[in-house]
Image (spheres, helix red, strand yellow):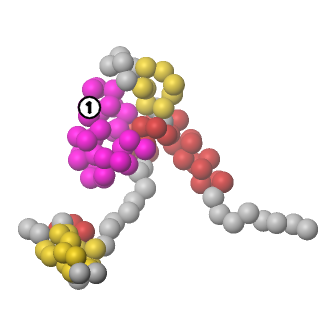
Amino acid sequence: MRKEAKASGRIIFLPEKHRKRGENVRNYRYLTFGDREKIETEYAAGGRPADIAIDLGVHVATIYKELKRGDTGQLDKNMRREYSAELAQRRLIESFKCRGRKSTTI
């Protein structure tokens, strides 16, 4: 069931899982290494990114970004870019190390 919410004179339909007290609230979470392994197995088996997104409960754009993060530069047996969960996890950890405020010394 959908619920209507008015914002700036527009009507927005909010899905059940994103509704909280009439507001458009989204739940964000990071993919775990287990999620990445599931992406790797399903994608290697020929799964579509849209179907993988439904299985994990994330947006399809998340899957495409993850496939880009774990791209090995090789082609798999389905002639698509190969995805490695381990490589994606390493790149994510490196990305976390680069985040935050940079210290400046004078």
> What x and y, as percent, mark residue 34?
39, 44
Q: Residue furthest left?
A: 1
> What x and y, as percent, mark residue 82?
43, 26
Q: Amino acid at mark 1?
A: Gly
> What x and y, as percent, mark residue 26?
32, 68
Label 1 belongs to which residue? 47
Q: How many marks?
A: 1
Q: Where's the N terminus, which quadrant?
A: bottom left
| Residue occupying the point 39% across, 20% down | 76
Q: Is residue 86 visible?
A: no
Quarter holding residue 63? top left
Q: Find numbered disc 1 in the image and state the secondary structure of the residue it sits on.
A: loop
| Residue occupying the point 23% across, 47% down | 54
Q: Residue furthest front?
A: 9
Q: Is residue 59 magenta?
A: yes
Quarter holding residue 90? top right
Asked if 70 appears above or below 59 in the picture, the reply is above
Q: What segment is highlighted magenta in the picture? A: 38-65
> What x and y, as percent, mark residue 98?
66, 54
Asked if 46 appears above or below 90 in the picture, the reply is above
| Residue occupying the point 29% across, 38% down | 49
Asked if 17 appears above or below 84 in the picture, the reply is below
Q: Is residue 74 magenta?
A: no
Q: Residues within 10 Å of mark 1 (few under 14, many from 20)?
A: few
Asked if 11 appears above or below 37 in the picture, the reply is below
| Residue occupying the point 20% across, 72% down | 12
